Image (spheres, rainbow, N blue to C red):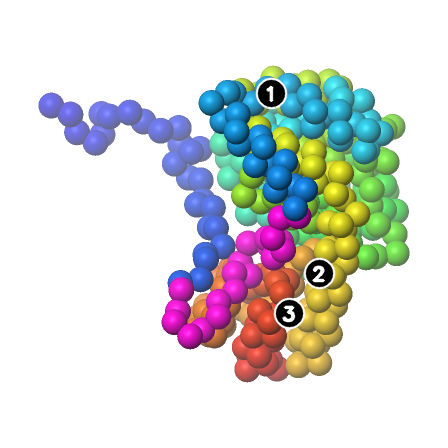
Amino acid sequence: MTSAHNGPRVRPAIASIPAYVPGRPPAPRPGVPTYKLSSNENPYPPLPGVLEAATAAAATMNRYPDMGCTALYAALGEHLDVPADNLAAGAGSVAVLYHLLQAYCEAGDEVVYAWRSFEAYPIAVAVTGATSVQVPLGPEARHDLDAMAEAITDRTKVVIVCTPNNPTGPAVGRAELEAFLDRVPPHVVVVVDEAYREFVRIDDPVDAVALYRDRPNLVVMRTFAKAYGLAGFRVGYLVAAQPIASAVRACSLPFGVSAVAQAAAVASLEREADLLERVDALVAERERVVTALREQGWSVPDAQGNFVWLSLGDRTGEFAAAAEEAGVMVRPFAGEGARVSIGDPAGNDVFLKVAAGFAG
Ligand SMILES: *Cc1c(COP(=O)(O)O)cnc(C)c1O
């Protein structure tokens, strides 16, 4: 006889993990064009050179990929001017974060990050058995770096700074980040999650790769999912001093980055100028959307990613439903607000029309 209570017991830390809520795709609706603005994806189709590189790599699908990511590390190393052994790639930068937290955290340890921020953080921390210490965002939905520095204790193993912050949008400036880094004890790993760095247009932008060179506890996390348009292929990486990169590689899933993803990432680096032109167009659209929202009366936090944040409180669900009715999927956070990705102009216009009805 078996019954539920004497079956396999999942670790309590796992049982309490909140579900990751993916941005929903729109349901096809006859006569209504639909737009997926719920996952911060790049609306552009793949560039020709990138698609061809991936297609060629697909021909070797009977083989395992290069586990050492040799070509990718060589291309990134040259691109960023870093040694290959300072890199660790994974199936998206979220996977890289999982591996990093596994390498540094266990039950009883603490991981400090801002909240609200990227919803993958609490999940990735919980998997290790460590405890999340969530530091509320400050005014204008910005990181409160002073409060984060004060939240560091003897138990803190990792601090995560998400800049620009998903889902609220503001970016941390270089001077304030450096002042913060100076306050973090050397035994604490600081992850700077730069998933949206290509979209940043502030006067004093962070380039965490420049900072990591003389900071052995600094980890730069980047992804090909957003500006580079490879979300579906799952490839991201970190840059850090060799001991950290090597510990992360030790925790990584063998053959975690597919051959198509490696080939597409390398080809994307070669086509970077074209990709960054597209990023410029998205930034211009973002500015158009933010200006229109502010004219409607919205107070929108500084949008430095490829998305905007509407603080809707208890009208969030109603707004998401109205947007869906109009053909636009957004990412609602119940009771707080909605994150809306910048898509192509037609989709953005539909979103703006819906937003007008909720303004003020
Ligand atoms: C999208 C995103 C990532 C990258 O995710 P991938 O796993 O590379 O697709 C990382 N951090 C933040 C804050 C993001 O929004």
Say if the magenta span includes residue 97: no
Q: Magenta stretch: dominant SS?
A: loop
Write the residue at 40% across / 32% down: 12
| Residue for badge 2 | 282
Above or below 295: residue 10: above
Where is residue 49 drawn, in percent x and y? 68, 42
Image quadrant occupied by the N terminus? top left
Where is residue 187 drawn, in percent x and y? 74, 24
- Name the side, left or right, on which 327 lies relative to 121: left
Cα distance in 3D space between marks 3 and 1: 39 Å
| Residue for badge 1 | 66
Q: Earlier in the sequence, mark 2 or mark 1?
A: 1
Say if the magenta span includes residue 40: yes
Q: Tag 3: Cα neighbours inside 10 Å, few (<14), some, or many (≥20)?
A: some
Q: Which residues are magenta?
A: 28-47
User: In which quarter of the view is residue 217 placed?
Assistant: top right
Cα distance in 3D space between marks 3 and 2: 9 Å
